[in-house]
Amino acid sequence: MLPRRRHELPPTAGLPLRPGDLLPGAATLAAQVAAQLGTPPLQLECSGTASLLIALTALRELQPLRRQVVIPAFTCPLVAIAVHRAGLEVKLCDLRAGHYDMDPAALQGACNEHTLAIVPTHLGGRVANVDATLAVARAVGAYVIEDAAQALGARKDGRSVGLLGDVGFFSLAAGKGLSIYEGGLLLARDPLLRDRLARTAARIVPRSIGWEWRRSVELLGYAALYRPHGLRLAYGNPLRRALRRGDPVSAVGDDFPLTVPLHRVGRWRQAVGAHAAARLPAFLDQLSAQAQRRRPRLHRIDGITVLDDPPGANGTWPFLLLLLPDQQRRDAALAQLWQAGLGVSRLYIHALPDYTYLAGVVPAQQVPHARDFAARSLSISNSPWMTDADFEAICGVLEAALR
C-alpha cells in the first residue's frame, strides 16, 4: 500500500505561474506564441472548444451543403459538443487497434460527399498521422482541422503541428503547458481562411464582462493553487470524493455542459499569458528530457505499451500515456495509484458513444478499438514536481499489477 501524501501531483505538467506573471502588461500573447512556434498569425479565443466552434462555423458557410464532421471515437467530449453547437452532425471513426490514431480504413468508410471536415487529434501531446487524414479529406473535398488542444509546441518534420491541415487549434486551459485558465489559439495557413476565421469570430463572439471577470478570478485561483500544496484542495479532494461515489466521469472532469461559452479574452489575461509564454520553450524542453529519461523504465515492465510519436515528430509530454494488457490489470493498478496523489489518472473515461449525457449528440456506434483504448489506458504525470522516488513507486505498482 502506498503511503498517504500531504502534497498532490497534477495529472498533467502545466507551466506554473509566477507572481510577476500577474502584473499588467501588453496583450501580446497570440503574437508571442506565433513567433515561438514559427507559425502565421494566431487568433486568440476564449477556449479551445470555442476555437473549434468558430472554425466549424466558418467552414460550414463555405460548404453549406456538407453537414458531417468526422472525429475520433476516443477524444475529448468537448469536440463532439462543438460540432453539435455548430449545427453539424457528429460522425465517429474508430481508432487503429492499440493506438490513438484513427483507423485509415474506417476513416475512408466514414467520409463521403457529405463530409465537411475531419478532426484528427494530437492526443495527449502525441503527434497524429495527419498525412493519412489529408489523403482521405482531399479525395472527398473535405477540410482538415487539427485538434492540437494538448499539443502546443509539438512539431512534425520541424514545423508546428496545426500547419498540415486547413485549420488547427491549441488550448490554453487549466493544466495545459501554457494556461490563462481558459483560452484557445486558432491557426490557418491560408490568408483568406485566416481572414474568414477572424470575421466569423468578430460576428459571433460577444464581449462579456461577466465571463471575463469569472475567468480572471479563476486564473488567480489557478495561480495560487497549481502547486503541490494547493492541488490537494483544488484537484485531489474533489477527485477522491467523485471516486467514492462511483463517478469516474466527474473525477477526470469529463462531465461537460452541452453549451460553449463565447466571449472575448481581456487584456489582463492576455498579459498574464504573454509573461508566462517567455518560459514555455525551456519548460517544454525540460518535460521532453524528463520523459525520455523515464520512458525506458516503463519499457522494461513486461506488458506495458508507452505511446510515442511517429518518425519525424516531436510531441509535447504533459504526461506519459500507457496501455496495459487488459482492463482488469489496468484497474488493479489504478486501485492503488489513482487516489495516491502521484499524478496517475485516466485521460478520458469512455469512448464517445458511452457517455450517457452525449446520447443526443453522438450516434450509437460499434467502435471496439476506441472502447478497448479507454479500457486499457492510463496516464502518468510528467510534472517536474514528480521525483524519481515518486516515479519508481508508480513503476513498482505497475509491475505488481502485471505479474
Image: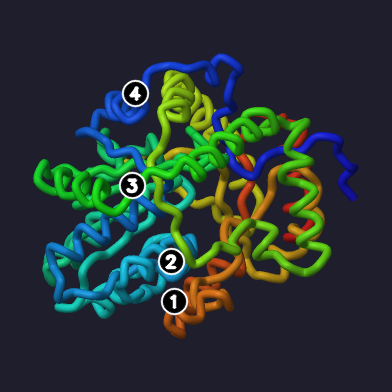
Please state, as top left, top right, bottom left or bottom right, where the C terminus lies in the image: bottom right
Disc 3 marks which residue? 169
Q: Camera-side residue: 59 or 142? A: 59
**Label drawn at residue 81:** 2
- Where in the figure is residue 231, as x and y percent of width and height? 73, 38
Q: Residues within 10 Å of mark 2 (few under 14, many from 20)?
A: many
Give the residue at mark 4. 28
Q: Say which residue label 1 marks.
A: 361
Task: Give the CA distance from mark 3 to mark 2.
Answer: 16 Å
Under mark 3, the amino acid is Phe
The three-letter code of the residue at mark 1 reads: Val
> Which residue sits at x=28%, y=39%?
43
CB within 8 Å, label 2 to label 1: yes
| Mark 1 → mark 3, Cα distance in angstroms | 22 Å
State which tag comes first along the sequence, 4 or 3.
4
Percent x, y for residue 280?
45, 25
Question: In the rendered structure, which disc, 2 or 1, sits on the residue that comes first in sequence?
Answer: 2
Nearer to the camera, 235 or 21 = 21
The reply to whether discs 3 and 2 touch (Cβ–Cβ < 8 Å) is no
Residue in the picture at 31% in, 61% down:
119
